[in-house]
Every structure is written in C-alpha cells, then in structure tokens.
Amino acid sequence: EVIDIVKIIFRMCKENHSLRQAVRWLNKERVPTSQAFFIEHGRESKEEKHPKWTSEKVWGVIKQEGYVQHCRHYEKCMEMGRHCERIPIIDQETFDEVNHYCRYRNR
C-alpha cells in the first residue's frame, strides 16, 4: 500500500501536477500519512497534531533517494549468491525528472 502511494505521488508530479495538487488529492482521498498511521495504531508520533498531507511531506517523499535504490546490502548479497528481494520503487530517470521539475516549481 505504501509503495502504491509513493508511485502515485511520483506519477502525479511527473504529469506536471504541482505539489499542492498532489496534497489536495491525497487529503481528499484520505490517504494516510505515516503520522496518521502511527496515531491509528496507538503509537506516538512527533507530528500528531498534523496527520494530513502537506507540500513539505510530499516534497519529503519526492526527494527520498531510497526509493530508487536496491537494499543497501544488495551488492554483498549478490556476491554471496543470495537474492535480495528489495527492488527500487521508482526508476532513476523518473526520480531525476521529478526532482528536477519540482525543484524549480513553486511548492
């Protein structure tokens, strides 16, 4: 479910939606933020007062380089003959395009 949300955010930004438009859609569809998830499951969160999406939260997703990488132990696992199941969520080209585009737009 989280992977789908990340892909949706990148797709919307790649299709020239602004961060504000993405925020409006995420909140309208009641897509939970990580803070909302923690609150719902009885865990404390630093941002308990703001469990809705904001431009800053969407920007935080967009600039997360971990979404374009294999697991950090991928090379070691491959050397040992193990198969690492974590694959990149977003391809490098999409990541670079969205980050370049959003960097120069008004958030």
Image: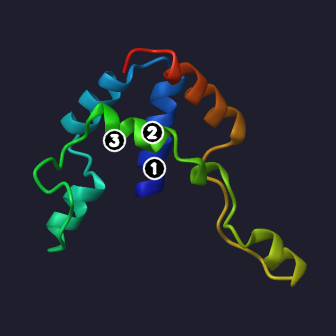
* Residue sticking out furthest to the front: 46
Look at the picture and state if 17 lies above or below 98: above
The local secondary structure at tag 2 comes to helix
> Marks 2 and 3, Cα distance to the nearest angstrom?
14 Å
Would you call the spot at circle 3 few (<14 residues within 10 Å), some (14-19), or many (20 or more)? some
> Marks 3 and 1, Cα distance to the nearest angstrom?
16 Å
Point out residue 46 in the picture as x, y percentages from the top left corner. 21, 60
**Residue highlighted by disc 3:** 57
Tag 1: amino acid: Asp
Would you call the spot at circle 1 few (<14 residues within 10 Å), some (14-19), or many (20 or more)? few
What numbered label is drawn on residue 4?
1
N-terminal of the pair, mark 2 or mark 3, is 2
> Which quarter of the picture shows residue 35?
bottom left
Point out residue 20 in the picture as x, y percentages from the top left corner. 30, 23
The local secondary structure at tag 3 comes to helix
**Residue highlighted by disc 2:** 8
Q: Nearer the viewer, mark 2 or mark 3?
A: 3
Point out residue 95 in the picture as x, y percentages from the top left corner. 62, 36
Q: Are marks 1 and 2 in contact (CB under 8 Å)?
A: yes
